[in-house]
Structures are given as C-alpha cells and as structure tokens.
Image: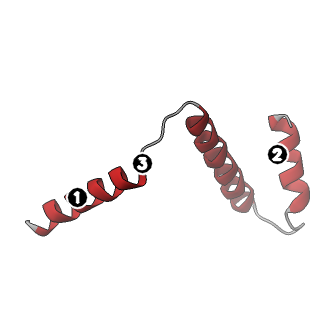
Amino acid sequence: MSTKETVLDLVRKLPDDCSLDDIQYHLYVLQTIERGKSEVTQGKTISHEQVKQELRAGWLNNGAK
C-alpha cells in the first residue's frame, strides 16, 4: 500500500468529528511504526538483555545524585 493509500485509509477509519490533532496523532503513530519496521529490517535492533542493562545503569546513575 502506498503512503497516500495508507493515509486515505486512516482518514476513512477515523470518526467524522475527529480533529486535526487526532489526525496528526494517528499519522505520527503510523510513521513511528513504519520507522520501527524499517529499522528491524535493517538489523538496527538491540537485545532485551542490553535494554535491561542500559536501564539499570541509568537508574543506578540517577540514584547516586
């Protein structure tokens, strides 16, 4: 599906009384999902274990302040 078709499909699915903010938010979500899919395809991922280690390191550093 092309980008234009994806946007048109989204707009059709939203309620008639949706605001421009609603549309922008849903477009942002779609864009973020597509970016994530692209990054996965390109192998730009990190392991669950690495995420846990980075979060723990951040919490430990913030706790020392």
Identify the secondary structure beneath mark 1: helix
Instruction: Describe residue 16's horizontal placement relative to residue 19 as left or right.
Output: right
Instruction: Describe residue 9's horizontal placement relative to residue 21 as left or right.
Output: right
Residues at circles 2 and 3 in contact by the CB criterion of under 8 Å: no
Is 3 placed above or below 49 here?
above
Q: Nearer the viewer, mark 3 or mark 1?
A: 3
User: Gap between marks 3 and 1, in whole Å?
Assistant: 17 Å
Q: Nearer the viewer, residue 29 or 50?
A: 50
User: Gap between marks 1 and 2, in whole Å?
Assistant: 38 Å
Q: Nearer the viewer, mark 2 or mark 3?
A: 3
Q: Earlier in the sequence, mark 2 or mark 3?
A: 2
Residue 31 in the image: x percent, y percent? 66, 44
Q: Nearer the viewer, mark 1 or mark 2?
A: 1
Amino acid carrying mark 3 in the image: Ser
Q: Which residue is rendered at x = 49% and y = 35% of the image?
A: 44
Residue 55 in the image: x percent, y percent? 29, 59
Q: Around disc 3, counting alpha carbons within 10 Å, would you say few (fewer than 14), some (14 to 19), or many (20 or more)?
A: few
Q: How many marks?
A: 3
Q: Which residue is tagged 3?
A: 47
Q: Which residue is tagged 2?
A: 7
Amino acid carrying mark 1 in the image: Gly
User: Gap between marks 2 and 3, in whole Å?
Assistant: 32 Å
Residues at circles 1 and 2 in contact by the CB criterion of under 8 Å: no
Quadrant of the frame with the C terminus: bottom left
Is 41 placed above or below 57 here?
above
Q: Around disc 2, counting alpha carbons within 10 Å, would you say few (fewer than 14), some (14 to 19), or many (20 or more)?
A: some
Q: Which residue is tagged 1?
A: 58
Q: Earlier in the sequence, mark 1 or mark 2?
A: 2
Q: Earlier in the sequence, mark 3 or mark 1?
A: 3
Residue 39 in the image: x percent, y percent? 56, 36
